[in-house]
Image (cartoon, rainbow, N blue to C red):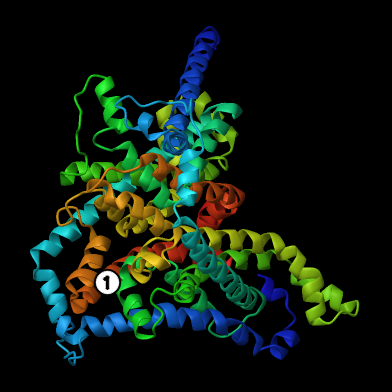
Amino acid sequence: MSTALSAAPKANRHIKVGKIIASIAAVALAIVWVFPVYWMVNSSLLPNAVLNSPTPRFLPFGGSLNNFRAVLSGGTFFPALKTSLIVTLTAVVLCLLFAFCAALAISRYKFKGRQGFVLAVLFIQMLPAEGLFIAQYKMMSSVGLLNTAIGLAGLYTAAVVPFTIWMLRGFVAGVPADLEEAAMVDGATRTGAFFRITFPLLAPGLVASGVYAFLQAWNEFTIALVIMQKESSRTLPLWLRGFVQQSNTREVDWGQVMAASSLVALPVIVFFLLVQGRLTSGLVAGAVKG
Amino acid sequence: MTTATVPPAQRRRFHVAPYALLIPAVAILLAALAYPVGWQIVTSLKQYGLAQQFGQPAPFVGLANYLNLFRDSQIWAVVVRSVAFCLVNAVVTVVIGVALAVLMNAVGKACRLILQIGLLLAWAMPVVAAMTVWVWLFQWHIGVVNWLLNHIGFNFTNHNWLEKPLSFYLVATIIVVWMSVPFVSFSVYAGLTQISPEVMEAAQLDGASGWRRFTQITVPMIRPVLMIVLLLQIIWDLRVFTQIRLLQDAGAPLASTDLLGTYIYRVGTGSSDFGMAAAMSVFVLILTMVLSAPYVRSLMKEDAA
């Protein structure tokens, strides 16, 4: 007992030193992880004369928005943005609609084949695009949907619908059916009760799922690479790839490449921060709560 | 759970409704995923080369494509590389991810927030944008990485990282780990916060060292989440395509740096042997299904709860 007491201050100091080291490590690692993101923004503001010098400049002093201006006036950004918007928004709307109906079915009804459907959905969400794109390419070319926004949007919808069903299922199950029934007792019709009571409560879930679907479709590269081979039908990720692709054959305009990357990345980062929490818990739900 | 609260009478009355509600989702999944999978299985059993693409009938050849696949030493090399790459990346990601989660748990609120914001920003980066930045960081002539290494005493002037397969994979690993660690850290951190501080304190009073507390208490308690994230990393890293493809774009030799995804892409689009490409795709799909089974089982448990 007495030895333990006399050892206490020393142990305390030990813990304190440990905590300081841990704090320094945490901040250092944060810097390591954020550095590429910072470097993208930093480089996008600097002129190529600075970027091409052998000594990097770590702060954007003397920077300007010239790279952004050059990218935007290059004439290829806006068509790609338009394609991306059409593809993504179509996919998001279809995906939410389909997934919402399916989520209602599996969380509000008990029916034959329900478990089989859930099992299929969970397996399908694991299917890698890399194991499917050859067949999807052949299918799209045989129905004449290669290089079309609607074709790509259809493939994206199918790719994102499974996880969206899974995510929405949780939200629908979280709204007790009793609430709806209470409204029906008070004289509302079933549809009325659904739209007045359940639907507003599901809004956050729909927004989160919608943003998730948006991010998936907006960032997708593999399927787009296979389906959208014409230069005029490129989505933003393909457009961005075009810049780096030639880096071995000619001098790359890194300032513009980084400005282009920033244009693609910054809106996505904002969106992502909005749904991050739900995304993590959706993927490992059973394990964390278990 | 909620289905149990629906009175039986209603359940019977609306028995067509659930099927009607499933129609759109099932239709799109059948059209965009099930049909291609079916086509792929059928094509993998056929001879389907250039001649067939120009209208010749494609004869069934049974399992010949699969046999060729297993006999082809180049494909074996790709498979071995893919599995090795996937395992190394998954393990490194999970180890670093857990370390960062433990660190988050150990530091004060301010430092934790700084670390979390750093990780979140990296996680949020769209993969193509992230790749352009990394290619720029590793650029042989004016990239920051070479500059930094020169600065601390090594000689990396004009060193081309993408030229040799091993250093190509090192760069790919750094990028994949950087991208994947945030998800692991946040998931594991969520698990760590569930461990009651009393248990830890009791162990500490009993004289257990930090490392012992970690291996004897922390790891067993977060075991379920560890298993899930490790499994997901393995599945995701096995199908890594975008990162490899974009690094190849930046000037790496294709044949010696291909992994499964990029190889299928090259066989399918370049040499136009759809039969072989389909056989390899089926192989990848089966591998993924097998690996996914435990994950799907754990999610089904969640559904039943």
Instruction: Report which quarter residue B279 is drawn in.
Output: bottom left
- Left or right: A220 in relation to B78: right
Q: Is residue B261 visible?
A: yes
- Residue at image position (44%, 52%) is A74
Q: Quadrant of the N terminus of chain B?
A: bottom right
- Identify which residue is drawn at 71% across, 63% down: A203
Q: Nearer the viewer, residue B98 or B125?
A: B125
Query: Residue A90: image x %, image y %?
Result: 56, 71
Which of B233/B170 is in front? B170
Q: Secondary structure at mark 1?
A: helix
Q: How many marks?
A: 1
Q: Residue B234 vs residue B123: left or right?
A: left
Image position, residue B120 (x, y; %): 52, 42
The residue furthest right is A186
A97 up-or-down from A19: above or below? below
Letter of the chain that mark 1 sits on in the rendering: B
**Residue at horizontal 18%, vertical 83%?**
B48
- Image quadrant assignment for residue B15: bottom right
The residue identified by callout 1 is: B281
* Amino acid type of the residue that numbered disc 1 sits on in the rendered structure: Ser
On the question of residue A290 being in view, the answer is: no
Q: Nearer the viewer, residue B122 or B235?
A: B122
Residue B121's x, y, as percent? 51, 41
Q: Pick the quarter of the image with the C terminus of chain B.
A: bottom right
A125 is higher (above) or lower (below) than A252: below
Residue at x-position 27% and y-position 71%: B281
| Residue count near mark 1 (Cα–Cα under 10 Å), binned few <14, some 14–19, many ≥20 | many
Location of residue A28 in the rendering, given as x and y in whole percent from the top left corner: 44, 26
Q: Is residue A289 above or below residue B186?
A: below
